[in-house]
Amino acid sequence: MRMTTVWGAALLVLGLAAGPAAADSTPSASPSGDASAPTSAGTSFRTATEIDQGRTATASASTGDYLYWSFAADVLERPTVRATVKLPASHAAQTWQVDVYDGLRRRQACQYGAQTRTAAQGTAEVEVECVLRTVRAWSEPWADDPLPGTYYVRLTTVRLQTADLGQPVDASVRVESKDIGGSAAVDGWLAEPLVPGVAVASQHDGKDDDSRRTAVLSSIEPDGGWSSGWWSDRWVWTGIGAVLAALAGIGGYVLTRGTGRPSRVPPGA
Amino acid sequence: MIRTQRLAAGVCALLAALASGIAFPAGAVADETTALAPKVDLVLDVSGSMRTKDIDGGTRMAAAKQAFNEVLDATPEEVQLGIRTLGATYPGDDRRTGCKDTAQLYPVGPLDRTEAKSAVATLSPTGWTPIGPALLKAADDLEGGEGSKRIVLISDGEDTCAPLDPCEVAREIAAKGIGLTIDTLGLVPNTKMRAQLSCIAEATGGTYTSVEHTDELTDKVNQLVDRAADPVVTPVATEGGSSCPKAPTLKSGLYTDREEFGQERWYRVDVDPGKELRASVSVAADRTMNPDHGLLVRAFTTHGREIVRGEAAGSGRTDVISTGLRYPKADSDDDDAPAETVCLLVTNSFSAASGVKTTPGMPVELTVDVVDGPSQADDVASFGLGRGWWLLGALVLFSFLAGLVWGWLSRWRVAVWRTN
């Protein structure tokens, strides 16, 4: 009886505490077709167009082009890259593929989603998708786990007929992230996010005499900057655990005392 | 002929400009900006076949002229634009002369729109299609400066000047200069032309587009010129050694090199204690390759022990294959601890059919970053904190038991004290 009350109270406290955290976890979706979203794509890692998460970037291109975009992904996010290509009116069967690379240009595996799809002859549209693994704050150098930093998206045709080369296509790409929360909060963190050219960029910051626009390999940051990495909802869970433990301890203690005076003590004492 | 016409046009434009009181912006550009200014050379095919009337009811030449006028209006101020023609002057049948027929219509430099437009207006479809020689000359036009360089080739037929393969010319141009890209546009192309123009584009990391309408041509050329105007990091050329002691020492930055099939390239990077080395390598497939390929990047100590590796493999059509690695060097208590030299070895497993040229090697792009090292993990979980219902249950259960025991203990103590 008492135990259920404790659990009930625990649930209530937890619900209150986890409320704001749960509200955070919905991806920050803004309406598509933003005026500020980029309308072109790069053609190599170096020239990749930087896009923000939750915005639909578009590009007009030609079949056979290699289209590159880059976005920033921070810890505890699980990014999903979705690309749609509007194909010309007549074409033979062609295979489109989306690849995601991390800041070290290592190919990242897709957990779910059709990364490669073949558009049959005359299809108007093809959609490819890649759901990445959760971005962690730290991993061993021998692993290729996703780390916070820049991610590159490459969209291209991997199989096509020569006759289809160079035909106009319209591509759009959208990156959204699911907040995975503290379950993926690992210990350790990187001194700098996995952003290519970060060492060179920080040297420039120090000099401060460079007034003209210098090109950097990647300058993208998540909204509100990179997370410092120390906060996770593990603090909430552990805190609530401590409070509940204290209450349970007191509860157990009180239980042994009963109500009022101990029965064995003589009334006259 | 062209030259005198251009001169005349230039004088007219100058007079017109002086009369209306418009100053030329050209001379006022600072030296530094000029050195970094992006350069674009538009190479236009003016061969006899451009007379064909199949683009929006007009001739191909008319479409090209209209597109050029619009592009010249929309060119960003910072771009230095030039125009080169091929097959514009020699109408005869002599192949040798016809294949040398390429001329600079407007020199690469600060753009005077009026002058450039009147130069374009003089063009009329004439001769052969010497794409290869025109590309070589265009590369010369773009020489000098550190900004990005782009050749936009607009053609309506394949090269008529074999055996000089324009595709190999493009590859050699790319190997000579850094950051030069060739984009190709085919006007009403056939399959052979598509293959040739897209081969030229792929050799330099450029794009190929088929054009059937005037507005497509305008949009695409505008897009390419704008792309040239985007500031981009220019890599530094380096040449990897055949073994670690012979390798060049690299600092943080972006580098470019060439690597042939099956060749080994070594580089050295000094990593101080407490720092982390990050290296990524891309090798571009700039020619017809066999479909299956791979790339291996390994970091070695100077004694030859492998520390960490990055590997990538792929199959099918691709522009580059890339991988990277990370090596955090442990911090040292000794302040004067020397930097460790890490040897990077880049090898590829690309292969090509026997007819394909193996030199120059494939372009390699190498990014090196030496940053502060990561803080090591002491636990799987962040700060060793707990999470989840099992944690709460365990905490509550153990505390409850502890409370009970404590309670009993104190009751027992009180009872003992009372009885005594």
Image (cartoon, rainbow, N blue to C red):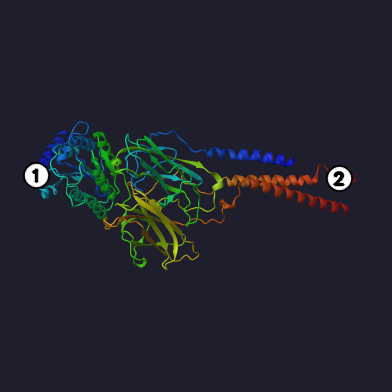
- Asked if the residue at tag 2 contacts the one at tag 1, i.e. Cβ–Cβ closer than 8 Å, the answer is no
Residue under label 1: B92
Q: Chain of mark 1?
A: B
Badge 1 and badge 2 in a common chain: no
Looking at this view, is A132 or A247 the one in front? A132
Can residue A37 be spotted in the picture? no
Looking at this view, is B329 or A129 the one in front? A129
Residue A108, above or below A123: below
How many discs appear?
A: 2
Is residue B151 left or right of B305 when viewed as pictured? left
The image quarter in which residue B264 lies: bottom left
Rendering coords of residue B357 (x, y %): 26, 56
Is residue A130 left or right of A25 when viewed as pictured? left
* Mark 1 or mark 2, whichever is nearer to me: 1
Can residue A233 be spotted in the picture? yes
Q: Chain of mark 2?
A: A
Q: Secondary structure at mark 1?
A: loop
Rendering coords of residue B93 (x, y %): 9, 45
Is residue B318 left or right of A194 when viewed as pictured? left
Q: Farthest residue toward the top?
A: B57
Q: CA distance from mark 1 to mark 2?
A: 125 Å
Residue under label 2: A263
Q: Which amino acid type corresponds to the residue marked 2 in the rendered image?
A: Ser
The image quarter in which residue A173 lies: top left
Looking at this view, is B193 or A82 the one in front? B193
